[in-house]
Each structure stands twice: as C-alpha cells, then as structure tokens.
Image (cartoon, helix red, strand yellow):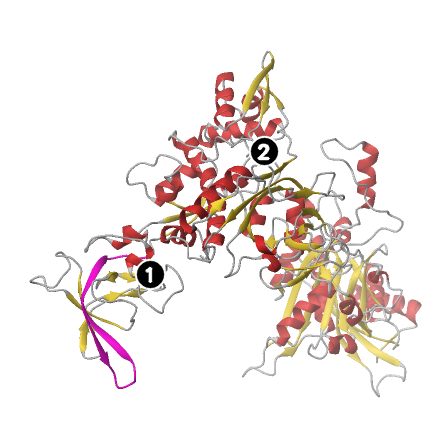
Amino acid sequence: MPRVPLPWLGEHVELPVGLTAEQLAVDLVRVGLEEEAVHAAAVTGPLVVGRVVERTPEPQKNGKTINWCRVDVGPEHNEPGGTPRGIVCGAHNFDVGDHVVVALPGAVLPGPFAIASRKTYGHVSDGMICSARELGLGEDHAGIIVLSEIGVDAPVGTDARELLGLGEEVLEINVTPDRGYCFSMRGVAREYAHSTGAVFTDPALPEPTDERPAGFEVEIDDDSPIHGVPGADRFVAQVVRGVRANDPSPAWMQRRLQQAGMRPISLAVDVTNYVMLDLGQPLHAYDLATLHAPIVVRRARAGEKLRTLDDQVRALDPQDLLITDSPEGRGSRPIGLAAVMGGGDTEVSDATTDLLIEAAHFDPVTVARSARRHKLPSEASKRFERGVDPRLPRVAVARVAELLVEHGGGTVDAELTDVDRTTPPAAVELDLDHPARLVGVPYTHDEVRGVLTEIGASVQDVRPGVVAVTPPTWRPDLTVPVELVEEVARLRGYDAIPSVVPPAPAGLGLTWSQRARRGIADSLAESGLVEVLSYPFVGQEQLDALGLADDDERRRAVRLVNPLSEAQPFMRTNLLVTVLDTARRNVARGSTDVAVYEVGLVTLPRTGSGPAPALPGGVRPSDDELAAIDAAVPAQPRHAAGVLAGRLEPAGVWGPGRRADHTDAIAAVQRAAQVAGVPVRLVADAGRAPWHPGRCARVETVTGVVLGWAGELHPNVVAAHDLPARTAAFEIDLDALVAAAPTEPLVARPVSTFPVAKEDVALVVPSQVPAADVLAAVRTGAASSPAGDVVEDVRLFDVYEGDQVAPGHRSLAFALRLRAGDRTLTAAETAAVRDAVVAEAAARFGASLRA
C-alpha cells in the first residue's frame, strides 16, 4: 500500500504546521483513504553533525586497526568545558576536518540499536560515527557518511535527523481498487485538499502541448485486443544523452524512496521510480545503445520467451503485451513485458550513458492478466491495473529528463516520440436529484455541481435538472451515474448520512426445522462428540479410500472449474469422506481416542442438468432464464456424519474403559431421530460401503424412507485412513429426517400413578433373524394383548448362543415395562402380555419361549 512522507506530500498541498501522521490519517479517512499503519521515525534521540578534529589509528592484537577520534559536536553536546567527544570508529574513509553524522548516547538507530557510552579497545566511546546502513539510508557499511561527499553542507551541532529526513513519520494508507490515482503523492495530495480545503497545486498541469519532431521510432500494433480494447493507446519516448546513469541518486531522493518502501539502485532507476511515486505514471529507462528501431508494442507469439530484469526466462502467452525492438526485423526481439517488468537485454548497465525514457498508457485488463499469469506484482502493474491518467506520459517524461540532467549531466534530444491514440472520457448523464434520492441526504443541485467540479469533472447542462458529467482523465472508474453519486456522498461526508436502523419486525424466532437441526446437533455434542468443520472439496483418492464401487452414485460428483487444489477438484457427495479425513488427521497427531461429528452440505448433481446459462449483466433475467439457472444448480441436502474411534470411556483405576463400537454409532442416530420425533427402524445392510458388511444398519422411517447408515467401518477403510481398529461411523440425511418429522402438535399423555409391572421374555429364534425384527414383533404382540396397550418400554438385554439352545438358533431376552393408566395390572394381565408376545414372535419367526 502507498506510503506518504509528510514533507513530500507538502510539496503538492499546503499542510498546517505541526501536522502529524496520525492527524493526516484522520483527515484522509474522511474521504475514504483508510490508515494501514503509521511508521515511526527511523531514528530517535540526539543525532547531530560533527567535525572530526583528531584521528589516531591504533593497531590491535587481532590485526584490526581502529581510529580513536575526537569529534566536535557543538557546544550543546561536547564534553564539559567544550572538549570534543571521544569516539572509537572502525572505518577509515574519513579524515580530520570532515563533517560526519554522530549518534550521541540516548539515540536509537534502526534495528532498534540503542547508543550508549561504552568502554571498548581501551577507550570510552561516547557515541558513534554512523554509516549509511546504520542509519537506514542504504546498504553501504564499508565506510561512514562524509556529508561533503553527498552534497550536504551543515554547521557543527546541526540536528542530523531533520537534515537527512530521519525524523519523519510516514503514513501508510489502504487504497481501494477503484482509486488507483491515490498510488501517488499527486493523488493523495488531491484527496487531502478535498478533505480539508487546503490549497492543492497539480504537478501534472498544464500538460505540454508543444509540437516537437518525432524521435526514436515507435509503433503500436495490437492485432489481438482483449474485449476489443487495445493493449496500449499511448507511448511517449524521449532520448537523454551523456548521462551518468549509474551514479548514485541524491541523498534526498534515496531517502524518499526508502520511506516509500523502495530500494535505491542508481540514478536512472531511482529517478524513474521517484517520478512514478510522485505523479503515478510508471516509467522505464532503456540503454539506448542496445536498442534497434523501431520499437513495436505487440502481443506475444506462441513459443516466445523473455529474460526479465530479475534474470528469469519466462515463457510468454499470446495475451501478453510486449515491448519489442527490431534487431532482426520489425518487432523481432521482446525487450519488456509491458507495464509489468523490463527485459534484461536492454537494462541500464555500468557503461550506459545514453537513455531512452518510456512512459506509456496500457489497458488495465491486459496488465492484470499478465502480472498474475507470471506472478509479477510489480509497482508498475499495481498502478496500471487500477488505471493511470493517460495525460501523464509527457509530463512524467519531461520531469525524468529534468532530474537526469540536473543530477547526472547530459542533454535532452529536441525530438520527442508521442504515439497518442487515447480517447477522451465519455460523458455521463446525471439527474441532479439522484444523489439525494439514493443517499437520503437533501443535497442541493449546487452542491452536486460543486462536488463534481471539485473532483476535476466538467459539468454541462443537458436539460433542466440533468447534466452531462465528463470525468477527469485520472478517474477512469467514473463511468455510470451511481459512481458520481458515490463521489457526492464521499466528499460531502459519510458522517452526514443519517443512520436509520429499520425496526426489527416481530417474529416467531427460529423455524421448527431450524430448532430441530440445532437440537440434533446438541444431542450429538451431549453424547460426547465434538463438532468439526471440514472443507467440502475431495479428490479421487479420498473416494477410493472409502471402498466405493465404480458405479456407486457417490462417485458422480460436481467438478470445480477453478479448484483450490488440483488434488481435490470435486465437491463432496457424502459428508463422511471429509469427516474421516478430519479424524485421520487427529489420530495422526496423537489423539487416538476420537469422537467427532459434522453437520454440513453435500452436493448431488442432477441427472440430465446442463450448465447454467451465461446471462448479460445489468438486465433482470426472465422467468425462463431463472428457471434454467435453478435447474442447473445441483441439489445440496444437509447431512450429519460422525466418526467414533478408540475409547469412549477412558481406562483408569475404575477399570479398562470401553472402546467405541457399532452400537455407539447406531445409538447416536437413534438419539438424533428421537430429538426430531421420528420413529425409525434399523435394517441390516451388508452391501453399503464404507461399512462392515456384518455390522451395518440402514436407518429408515416406518414408511421405508432411507435416512442413512450407521455401524462399524470396513477394516480396509480403517486401514486406509490409519484409524484404530473397529472404528465406527454414521451418516444421515438431516433434511430428510426433519421432513419426516410429524408437524402436528405433540399431545402430552397423562402420567400414570399406578405401579409398574415388569416381565422378562426370552425367545429362541433362528440366528439369521435380526434382533430389530424380533423387537418389533415383541412390541406388536404386547400391544395386542387382552390387557390393552400397556407397554411403556421394551429393551433387549441379553443375546445367548450356546449349548442351551438348538444349533443355528439364539436366545434374545427382552425386558418389558408395563403400566396401565387406569388400574394396577394383575398377574393374569401381565401373563397375557407375555403370551401375546410369544404368539406374535412364533407366528413371524417360529420363535419359542426359552425354557
């Protein structure tokens, strides 16, 4: 994000005395530029100009030679009596009489590095003579700063923090994508003027309009524009000869670049970066000696490559816009990825003296695609993809040429190339009453006109109450009336917009289905399971790990066009696949006892549904188009799934604990159904992956609607996920469960005050008969007894196979809890219930009462 040094900003707009970065942030936020950070001064404490009055070299035992110096730092800072301070220095690039920068005790340098008096090499060093790197002014650490060598002349005792700009705070702001002009001091200064009314002087006005003969030949030849928009519509080139291009830039310029977060490199590079930061126009400097006319701006060809300034060879895409020159024919050699990064073949080198300065205007879409395609988010691309003022190139080139001549010598050619195919911004019609209607603030017509004129727009009357607004060239985001309305609201103050909170309508709170889903989730949590949340993306390997057959419907999944990971390109068709992955991850990290559940959506593609139609923007779709979109959207039912692995009850002094098994998974589903008020039945299912064929129950409603499955996982699935043996799991269709719930109010039954009668029945049935079917027969028989429906509860409490029953049979023992609402049951009635149970089981399964 842009960084704003206050003195630099003050060159374009009047700033009040004593303005701080915090206050600047407050002023800018009023016009929509939010504070990102305030960067404190690079150096705090006393930092002064000193004069070396004595330097004595002292060889050391380690072979190093240090200098014992006496430095005059002014009457206020010298030792008592005016004696110059004694300082130990290891550098040797200075001598007696030189003016240097001295950090006195109490100063804090970047790092942070606190300066104090300390004994070293047999002396008390009372401060430090500073190098550029120690002050954060560059990477040079070989020698200290001699002020005369960087063109600075200041008396002894002068505050060096102010002299070198080291005491300046820097405000970093957050700029929204539609306001790219604020990536420059020019843009921020304009916004500060809007906020405070301060006088703003536009450094880009007036634009030079003088006619000059054409210089270096440039052609724009875009034969494949994106969306019909040429990749470039302006290209300005200026030759500057005899420049000391690789000299260091002036200290003030280096400091400003560093404050803006950029590294100083050389005069030619620093000047182009400085003007870019100042005006907002990216520029590039070429070594003129390496160029071959003409320069051609064109799209890349298949198979072309470019070595960029970072010494990377990049394969180019036909949508990339290139800057090329012509050593072997017109446009034969790529020398830059337009608006992103220059090429290595024409970069400025130590031998460069003649420069070609480029300033162009490029299409934001083209730039953004190239920057992302090559993963090169450069400072230039940041600005071009947000929109750059097309009237800036000549201004910027002239400013660069001026700075190069001033600080590097040389001359500017009288010729100038300016290929200009830009078009003026289109006018936007605006009803002057529209801002008041849309924002809710009674803006007058004069206020609306004033704001639009203030931002640089031209306002012309079209008819009464309607004006044609031509946005300024630096605001390419203003293309429709509502964006002009936003400008009125922004500059008249968001705080002037009243906050009208709509009254909350009286309602019934959560719907029944919402309460049911929350109740089911609560029941699972109360059962000891921990809720988790997983990503809904899966890969083919995860489906294979479930052991699904090739024709299983769960393998037919929706594939994402742009997945987060190519390893997981599908939307999940069942919830268990991602919950198992979560359980596996927890077990791998040492949590061997896992009980987790998730409530989430699955995506089930509809058979025969085609892709959704692509509709134009800004027009309400027809009913048929909306129906086509709805038909293309896959079903997304809500499921609940859980995994139970390891121990449910921990081992300890109380005993060995208890491992989770298939009955726990089934019980969790039964509790969920009980919360929803849905009676369910369990049916053995030997063919449903990923469960064990002998320990899996299909959960159905009494009408046969399948709700899900629960039981022990197949050993192969357990092994594939590295889970503990006998891991159990469940998955149910939560939407189907809620839909099956009764909608009529639940009528409470009176509580009987009569005593409970208990009866145990042990039935011998064939081993292949499911216990759930026998339990259903017991309930039916008990309810049909002469005593009436007096069954409160039936529970299977024992299963026996052994010598006391016939081979191929087993004994199932049920405990019946009986109670009538109007009387105490007699022994004969309870016996009749037992007989009815035996009779019903005998009729269904050939059961007999165990002796």
Residue contact at pointers 2 and 1, CB within 8 angstroms:
no
CA–CA distance in space, label 2 to label 1: 65 Å
Residue at 29% of width from left, 53% of height from top?
152
- Tell whether 402 sits left or right of 780: left
Query: Considering the numbered disc 1 on the image, is that residue within a helix, a strand or a loop?
Result: loop
Residue 751 visible in the picture: no
Residue 574 horizontal/vertical position (percent)? 76, 60
Magenta region's main secondary structure? Answer: strand
> Nearest the camera: 9 or 774?
9
- Residue 409 part of the magenta segment: no
> Nearest the camera: 35 or 559?
35
- Residue 47 part of the magenta segment: yes
Q: Answer few, some or many: residues within 10 Å of disc 2's Cα (few below 14, many 20 plus, some between 14 and 19).
A: few
Residue 241 visible in the picture: yes
Query: Considering the numbered disc 2 on the image, is that residue within a helix, a strand or a loop?
Result: loop
Q: Which mark is residue 500?
A: none
Please name the residue that numbered disc 1 is placed on.
Answer: 135
Residue 22 horizontal/vertical position (percent)? 36, 44
Please report the bounds of the magenta region as a residue range. 43-70
Disc 1 marks a residue whose amino acid type is Leu
In this picture, is 199 found above or below 713?
above
Please name the residue that numbered disc 2 is placed on.
Answer: 506
Quarter of the figure with residue 505? top right
In this picture, is 260 found above or below 531?
above
Residue at 8% of width from left, 63% of height from top?
80
Residue at 82% of width from left, 71% of height from top?
547
Mark 2 vs 1, N-terminal side? 1
In this picture, is 259 found above or below 89?
above
